[in-house]
Amino acid sequence: MPKILLVEDNEMNRDMLSRRLQRKGYEVALAVDGLQGVTMATSGGYDLILMDMSLPELDGWEATRRVRDAEAGRRVPIIALTAHAMSGDREKAMAAGCDDYDTKPVELERLLGKIEALLGKQA
Amino acid sequence: MSGLTTPEAVAELRHELRTPLNLIIGYCEMLLEDATEPGQRGALEQTLAAGREVLERINATVPPARGEISEADFAALRDALREPQGRIVAATTALLAAGGDIDPQFERDVRRIRSSAERLLTVELPSGRSASHLAITIEHPTAGPLAGPPVQPAHILVVDDQEDNRAVLERRLRRQGHTVESASGGISALGMLAKERFDLVLLDVLMPDLDGLAVLERMKADQNTRDIPVIMISALDDVASVVRCIERGAEDHLPKPFDPVLLRARISACLEKKRLRDVELEYLREVGRVIQAATAVEAGSYEKGALAQVAQRGDELGRLARVFDAMAHQVRAREDRLKEQVAALRREIGEARQTTRQAAPQNALSLPTGQLFAGRFEVLEEIGSGGMGMVYRALDRELGDQVAIKTLRPELLQDATLLERFKSEIRLARHISSKHVVRTHDIGERDGIYYLTMEYVEGITVRELLDTRGRLGTAPTLAIASQLAQSLVAAHEQGVIHRDIKPQNLLLDAAGVLKVMDFGVARLAGGNANLTEAGMIVGTPSYMAPEQMLGEGVDQRTDLYAVGVVMFECLLGRLPFEAGSAIALIARVLRDQPPVPATLDPEIPPALSDLVLRLLAKDPAQRPANAAELLHLLSDLS
């Protein structure tokens, strides 16, 4: 069962998305801010990271950069999530080291497609 | 175009709108995966459809490529969101009201959908106008619906048990420029209110530990918090509790979900009301300070600068305080100057006094010095004698204080009616309160001798002063006259006419303060006493007004005539009328015009001379109407 780390500060968003992913058969671990996200991500064991970009302590862009900096071998796929939906965000996310990008409100089928594509690439 | 925003602000706006929408759509899709009951499915499908409509409208107004939005566009978007948002709220409310066995998880998720929908309409256009558009915004200050008057920054306490509500309110209020603290319950709110000063409290009605109503009641019962305005937060349908809160002193109420425009307007209004109330309270406090100062001036204890704070005001009250302070200072300085002049005179004759005093012959009214009188007064020395009796300095052993004792000739008190009238006059005189009046303590009788006890004043009389100096000059005369007038204002206020104002009755204490003796005492010489009958004349008629000599009614103006004689004598060292006998004197007083003081001494200012002549008018109606008017006329002369 693939293991996803969801880094999201909004309690309701965390609850909703993690439950929806669990229903689709993923195991979900939760981090509530950027720092916790980096700590958990670098301790390993996750197949994919869903990273919200507006986070307290450390924003998603910076958290992603730190995760990438700490990685030695295997590169964990990271999908950036944002409700800002600004043009240029995708490029910015890619530049920070994300593998893909999606906007809120999350369209689950679309997100699952991106998750599976990245996990498939891994496998 | 006006009120344009920066790209960052538009991004923030998208985030604010899409975050609740994400929850609406996400939870709704998830619940639909499980829902089987057709009614439930229908409501959820309606909710989902409305949510997608909201998203379309947001995307149409602020597509990702767009970096700015005008206030008008934003207002239009809000209006467009109202309808689908209303459908979501209605559908979820119906789901929650359906009753039966609702799964707690399902119920919680539906509530989250509804609260997210409510939040949608509370989103405000983030601040952060781009600089290039600032000028345009200023040119059209009333352009958009969100352009209200600037809110004065305040320190606000938000009390709500729901974290979401607190977070939304805190964010909104901070954005409006306020500083915000929050409490999750009534008890912790009261704790914070005890420690910190807030300008405004937003208080949820329904809370588990201590509800809003109870918090409000405790706030209103506490002197430290009762003036802090409170706005109640409540659901729209809870009208009854809102009414209760307003009856108990809440300023306003704010329905959930919070409409940011309404929130701003109500908070503004509330703070403005508080500001006006504070201004009004401060004004009243300062009016109180001016009144206090006036009381202090009357008591002679006003210190210059006591009104400094009020005097700083830019308004009429400040002007009043400044003028008042300057006037009080002038009056005080003038009084001090006059007192100093009198004190100097007093010092000058201090020694002479000892030699001029003659021992009075012993008689029935004499009290042996060194002995106890009436069981409590140790007689120390004789300090005067006159037509009425003798005056002694004595120690009141009961009070441990010095008093003056005045014995009264028994023949004056033989008429029972007269004695009664005298006693009642003394009772009245005891009520006169002025630093210029020698206080009368009591009237008593021992071994057939009636006596009065009075405040003992270590001083000299104006009589002694005149005997030593002759004339006193303008300034000391004015000092004596104005203090004499003050004593008469106080006495006449109590309905006491002195009837026997003369230099012998005017004492100057060590500080130069004039004190008038024998208020009420002259009553003894009144009545039908025949003035020409030997032994019945008290003192001399030199200071008596014509109406007094004729046995016509006396009133306060009779005392003013006597003041005129005293002033004449102080200025010129002689009486206005002089004669070889009492009868001749009376004839002159009734018939002749007094000499004009300024003619006798050109040094005397004409206005002062005129005033003395007015006081000496034969017809009381020609004199100043009362002592207060005299005081006023005198102050114009000093």
Image: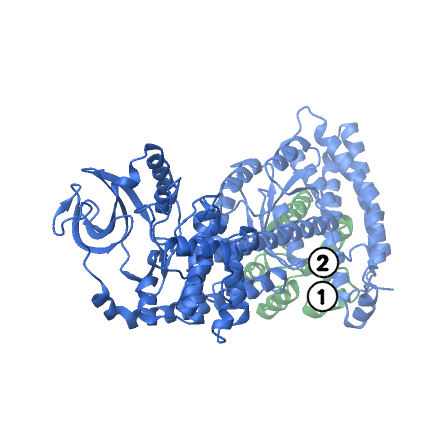
Chain colours: A green, B blue
Kind of residue at disc 2 = Thr
The residue shown at (34%, 43%) is B524
Image quadrant assignment for residue B624: bottom right
Helix, strand or loop at mark 2: strand
Q: B306 above or below B516? A: below
Image quadrant assignment for residue B30: top right
Residue A15 lies, in percent from the top left, at: 64, 45
Q: Is residue B162 left or right of residue B557?
A: right
Q: B53 above or below B174? A: above
Q: How far apart are marks 2 and 1 (CA)?
A: 10 Å
The residue shown at (62%, 33%) is B244
Residue A123 lies, in percent from the top left, at: 68, 58
Tally of marks: 2
- In this rendering, does residue B543 appear at all? no
Residue B111 lies, in percent from the top left, at: 68, 38
Between A95 and B275, the one nearer to me in the picture: B275
Q: B522 above or below B585? A: above
Kind of residue at disc 1 = Ala
Between B336 and B313, the one nearer to me in the picture: B336
* Closer to the eye: label 2 or 1: 2
Q: Mark 2 lies on which chain?
A: A
Determine whether label 2 and label 1 are within 8 Å by CB.
Answer: yes
Helix, strand or loop at mark 1: helix
- Residue on which disc 2 sits: A82
Residue A93 marker: 1
Q: Mark 1 lies on which chain?
A: A
Residue B253 lies, in percent from the top left, at: 67, 41
- In this rendering, does residue B380 appear at all? yes
